[in-house]
Image (cartoon, rainbow, N blue to C red):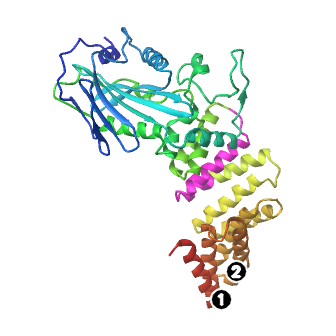
Amino acid sequence: MTWFRRLLGRSPGAESGTECPVRFAVADWQRASSEAPDTWTWRNEQGDSLTVAAQSRPPFHEGEAATLDQMRSTWRKRAARLDASLVQADITQIGPALGFFAVIKSRDGLKAKYSGSLLVPLAAPHYEIRMDAEERGITGQRDAIVTACLAQRGEIRLELPDARGGPARISGFCEDPYDPQFDRDTLNCVSDDERVDLVLSDHPLSRMRRTLALIRESLTFAPGALLEGTGAAVPDASRHAEPRRGRLSHATAGTLLFKARLFDQSEAAFAASIAEHEMAGRPLDVDIAQQLLGLGLSRDCQGKHRESIPAYERAEQVARTFLEPGHPLIAMTINNRARALIALNDHAAAEPAFEQALQMFHALEGQQTNAAIALNGMGMVRNAQERWAEAIPFLEKALKIFDAAIGPDAPDCGDVSLNLARAYAHVGDVERAQQALDNVKRIRGE
């Protein structure tokens, strides 16, 4: 008998009592009444429901399904009977045992509804732990955020209706997670990618996955409840941990995660995208230069300045291969490399980089804020070299640009004001030094 048949196969069990043989944490959930026998229900303040129900047979087992693909097919059929679509279906570790995790999605008008199930094969009976959650109030938030990110990266491609009619679709936006022949009718889309959960933590799909993950980790069983063999290690089960299709590209995920200031996650996504590109033997292009810039920025924002510099250098090298010498992308790679050098106190290397970037930004339209970053950098270099009087004109220009472009309350204005306060103080201009410090305190709310 294969490991999967050991997981699924069992003899009809003894009758269950009123005591639920599975235990898990239900903080922030309130017990609700249930009329069905051997069923326990909870609700939370968001209106989600959590149910544990005994099953006379595994609800994922129709006939003698013994492969993961067959189980996914079974759940796709189950979803179809509910006018829903499969989002995810995988073998998973549930406490000390192996079980099954599935997510299906349906729509009620514009509102998306999700149902996630953990299927626990016990000696008698089997149990399904199900959480139901739906969009309330604002709808379509995941789709809107992801679509905007796809548009920014130029990944939006409309697909004309086929002979069956219907509206035009965004190519690749909706895909069955495992089988392309079901793409036309699926509701699963790239915005259902698990990485979007990190950006929209209170979205119903995000809450559902997070809650069921906590249950998987905290689940315990009554003595003798486990089906023999379900706790055994399963070779290569982990390779089924994520859907293979209908997910964001690593590059788009990196862009989305960076905007959400999840810099460790965006670093991992950009690195994975670049590695994937190289392993496929595809030629370098401008998009790879932009991803290398994103990789450098992700590292910089985590304080990993030394690691960011090679990413900036390679981004500049790739960008120069495909773009005109004065292109903004080239200037941005130089400017950010200079900022990393400043953070490493390498002022001698930072100064010529800032000078080069500043010349490029001055020659370009619409690059005022980038020019202000370079001006501030030039001032910081001179402050560090105790060239206080030389620093002041650069910093004053930077503050003037930031003030006009992004507003006087922006954090960048506070950073420049602090640099100005140091310079003013060292040249003996006590009054303007105090004014600059007062500006810093106002911006930072001190």
For the residues labelled 1 and 2, the Cα–Cα distance comes to: 10 Å
Q: Which residues are magenta?
A: 282-310
Q: Secondary structure at mark 1?
A: loop
Kind of residue at disc 1: Val
* Residue 208 coordinates in the image, percent (x, y): 41, 37
Q: Are marks 1 and 2 in contact (CB under 8 Å)?
A: yes
Q: Is residue 15 above or below residue 406?
A: above
Q: Which residue is mark 2?
A: 392
Residue 252 counted in the magenta span: no
Tell me if residue 148 comes above or below residue 353 in the rendering: above
Residue 264, how many percent across, how many down? 51, 49
Out of 439 and 132, give the one closest to the viewer. 132
Question: For residue 130, which quarter of the picture?
Answer: top left
SS under mark 2: helix
Residue 427's label in the rendered image is 1
- Residue 274 in view (yes/no): no
| Percent of width and height locating residue 323 | 80, 47
| Outermost top residue | 63
Circle on res. 125: none
